[in-house]
Image (cartoon, grey):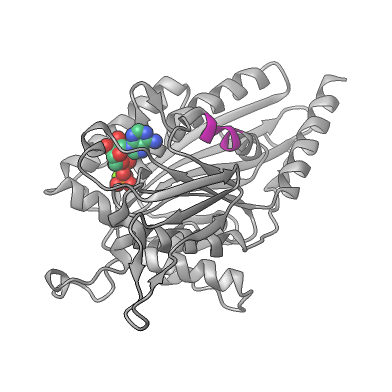
Amino acid sequence: DLEEHDTLRRSLHNTIQDMKGNIRVFCRVRPPVTSEETERQLCAIFFPNETSLEIRKARESVSVISGKPVDLKQEFSFDKVFPPEANQAEVFEELAQLVQSALDGYHVCVFAYGQTGSGKTYTMQGSSNDFGMIPRTVDLIFKKIEKLSTSDWTYTVSASFLEIYNENIRDLLVPNSTHNYEVHYNEGRGVTVTNLEIVPISSAEELKVVMEEAQKNRAVAATNFNEHSSRSHAITKIHLEGYNAETKAKYSGSINLVDLAGSESARTSGPERLNETKNINKSLSTLGNVMLALHNKDQHIPYRNSKLTFLLQSCLGGNSKTLMLVNISPFEECFLESIHSLRFASKVKEIKTVAKKNKTYCTMPPPK
Ligand code: ADP
Ligand code: MG
């Protein structure tokens, strides 16, 4: 029986996914773009195999204590390492499997982490000739839903777009809004944001149109877009509600795609920033602390210390699958920031969570 076969296939898929662990960490080193090739000194980065990388400064440094050269070579390993020549399709391969998990009721969260200029936005959005993770995810969701439409499953898709800047939430679909956006947690509904637009979506094309509008609004509100995007987090959230008319099973999953603020912004404190808040990017540093607390299995996880972690609480704890994409710049001057990102990523890799499906049975069809 087809339905039974489908259920079995899905459950096998998710068992395999669970065995792979619920937090996966990928590292991607971007290539220099044409104008940078002659201007900037490259860092020496080696890729011994698919899951590790070795990084060393091209010029040897000398220890201030002994006066001898210090070996700055460091080795890291992750679930997957992508060299500069890797294309978006290769990076998307793993994420494609998580799209199925989201249709099966999991909360999936994909973070792009890294210093400004390391390739986060390129990885998430991509260019017009090589689409990034967000447009690929959208296409795959609707392709899969289309396939399922011959079964007893129907899905409703909706989306929201927001950004967090200076601990304030902005709805990217409602520019210049005077509303107050607050994060709330409720046992039944999980995390919600007051006043946030959640738009129903019926096709990949429709979702892309709304997404473009959100991107445009993000740029328009900023006086200096580069600085703005290096300090703000942009979150694309796609809700997926599945309902089986035959068995009355209901799945409620989501995919959150997060283009994080530049990782340097949580730590840099040059004199020009003294007048700003002491903590340049509270959400980004709290994300690190939450990851660390999860890693240490602390009793208290400080989710509520920042907007980002409160908002993504269900993606960071048990009920989720997380993909952390750590982006690295290939330049020597970025060496220390790269090491910082790689160490952060190594810590994240050690966290293990147990994901659980959000499946309920109801006797009524879900509200239209
Ligand atoms: P971030 O969002 O981390 O600040 P960007 O995504 O804007 O960084 O990338 C910086 C520059 O490098 C951009 O010009 C972008 O087009 C280019 N770039 C990043 N990643 C790649 C890649 N994998 N292939 C080609 N160009 C890339
Ligand atoms: Mg960017």
Does residue 164 appear in the picture of this structure?
no
Residue for point 78% across, 44% down: 15
Which one is in front, 149 or 265? 265
Residue 156 rendering spot, x and y as whole percentages: 55, 31
Q: Nearer the viewer, residue 295 or 167?
A: 295
Q: Is residue 199 above or below residue 145?
A: below
Q: Residue at the bottom extreme?
A: 65
Whether residue 314 is in magenta: the answer is no
The quadrant of the image that shows the N terminus is top right
Q: Look at 45% across and 58% down and name the residue there.
A: 311
Quadrant assignment for ligand 1: top left
User: What is the x, y in percent for residue 11?
Assistant: 79, 38
Horizontal side of residue 50 vs 333, given as left or right: right
Pick out the residue farthest to the front: 68
Number of marks = 0
| Quarter of the image where the C terminus is located | top right
Whether residue 39 is visible, yes or no, is yes
Q: Residue at x 84, y 25 (%)?
A: 5
Q: Quadrant of residue 76?
A: bottom right
Left or right: residue 340 versus residue 357 is left
Q: Nearer the viewer, residue 52 or 48?
A: 48
* Position above or below: 91 against 322: above
Q: What span is colored magenta in the figure?
A: 90-96
Residue 134 lies, with reference to residue 80, above or below; the image says above
* Image position, residue 231 (x, y; %): 27, 57
Find residue 57 and report its horizontal and vertical position in percent. Answer: 37, 57
**Left or right relative to 111: residue 99:** right
In the picture, measured across the screen, residue 216 lies left or right of residue 2, that is: left
The secondary structure that most of the magenta stretch takes on is helix
> Which quadrant of the figure has residue 135?
top left
Residue sitting farthest toward the top: 150
